[in-house]
Amino acid sequence: MAFPAQARNPLDFHLVKLNGTESGPTLLVVGGIQGDEPGGFNAAGMLASNYTIRKGSVWVVPNLNFPSIIARSRGGFGDMNRKFAALHKDDPDYTTIQRIKEIILDPQVDFVLNLHDGSGFYRPAWESETRNPKRWGQCVIIDQTAIGAQPFGNLEEMALAAVSDANNALLIPGHAYHLKNTRTNEGDAEMEKTLTYFAITNGKPAFGVEASKEFKTATRAYYHIRVLESFMRQAGIEYERDFVLTPEGLEAAMNRNLHLAFHNGKLSLDMQDIRSVLRFVPLNRNAEREFSSSKPLLTMVNNGNAYRVYYGNTHLTQLVPQYFDFDDSLNALTILVDGKPHNATVGSIVPVGNVFEVAAQEGYRVNVIGYTHPRLTNEVDIPIRKADFLPGYSVDNAETHYRVEVYRGEKFAGMVMVRFDEAAAAALNNNNAAPRTEDGAPAQDLAGNGADSNDTLGW
């Protein structure tokens, strides 16, 4: 699945609709209303990217407050989760609030989950400074016991079932979940301003889900997903996921398949282990509004003379552009991989064992970035080895990925990435397989920040 940049702004939030082949209820999941809570927005991102819904529907907004996510702040213009009761049109968050309200009120939406990371561990009675009724971590929140005679209206019953399911899958007993009823309609002025209470007052069952900020991101996301899956099962929503539900499995899945693509995929950049700066990247001047990403939390922001790339609240790299008009005529190159020819789709990654050679194609010029030859302006029909590259020109820190750029006249026609990987190249040659579009390198922690035990704010 590819997620295009928004037409107006790459920091607009995404709405991802996962629809099953069988009809059923629709769950809306919201993450990232507060940008310093990566467990919530990464769990929502995983739901958007790594789940298949078989029955019913799940709508996901993983990055509601994207500007605050990349800034690692609770909210650049104040707490967005306190703006649902009344908001002036001049407020910078006004458009975002109106959009998410419209989604909540969509007749197809049956109930809502809002994902947060909260301080400490909520406990009904005082146990310690970090485990007491004023803390927010590790709880499922309801505003009141029930909401009318409607499907999913028994809020307390569903929340207690989710708490029980989470507690059956604890990593250690001290991580236990509890139910927290804020009794908002009894005069809690702060909670009356929240997203869930807006939903409740408009006849939509809604729940808050909190994971503790004492945990690292993957552990927070693990507990969020345990609770999420409980609510889906209770609603009869059938699903499949493509990862093992452990913190380790989640971390690996969060950090794989991170790609930005431009010009309909003819230039694709793998973000895993990418250098902190890439220079002379061939882009057009509308790149910020025309790129697509492999995950909704992956985006690119114009920073003046360069583009800053973020995955959630992690800054991955900076792309320094060289602007070109694009030519659409080229779809593939012939590349000899260790002596065997392969048809390499423009935009793909080609594994190479020891040596590669780009076959000449009439009307096109090839520039292998980091390779120089004193007599060649078109770097084709010549064997190139890893040792032939100048230091510092790889795309990645491990110095395995290199850019093969193609031009037609003065226009950029696309790029193929070569990756030096003997095992993958042997498999390619033995099986005559198509070049893969993503690598299998070990994941690094790109998902977000870790524990923050000093934050007493929550829901």
Image: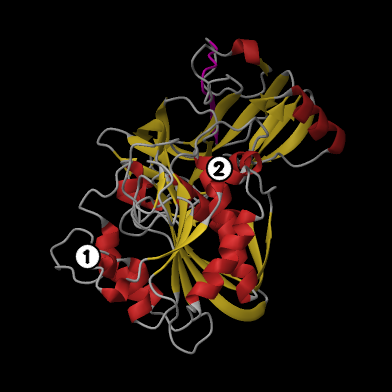
Name the kind of residue labelled 2 in the image.
Thr
In the picture as drawn, the residue positioned furthest to the bottom comes out as 149
Indicate the quadrant where residue 89 lies.
bottom left
Cα gap from disc 1 to disc 2, whole angstroms? 33 Å
Give neighbour class at mark 2: few <14, some 14-19, many 20+ (Cα, 10 Å).
many
Identify the residue position indicated by label 1 in the image.
Answer: 94
Above or below residue 275? Residue 111 is below
Magenta: main secondary structure: loop
Q: Residue at x 50, y 56 (%)?
A: 44
Q: Can residue 330 be seen by looking at this rendering? A: no
Which tag is nearer the camera, tag 1 or tag 2?
Answer: 2
- Which of the two residues, 100 or 386, is positioned nearer the viewer here? 100
Indicate the quadrant where residue 83 lies.
bottom left
Q: From the viewer's perspective, is 401 left or right of 42? A: right
Q: Earlier in the sequence, mark 1 or mark 2?
A: 1
Q: Residue at x 27, y 33 (%)?
A: 305
Q: Residue at x 37, y 77 (%)?
A: 200
In the picture as drawn, the residue positioned furthest to the right comes out as 430
Name the kind of residue labelled 1 in the image.
Tyr
Q: From the viewer's perspective, is 385 left or right of 16? A: right
Q: Which residues are magenta?
A: 364-373
Identify the residue position indicated by label 2 in the image.
Answer: 219
Q: Quadrant of the N terminus?
A: bottom right
Counting from the top left corner in percent of width and height, residue 96 is at: 29, 63
Counting from the top left corner in percent of width and height, residue 74 is at: 29, 47
Q: Secondary structure at mark 2?
A: helix
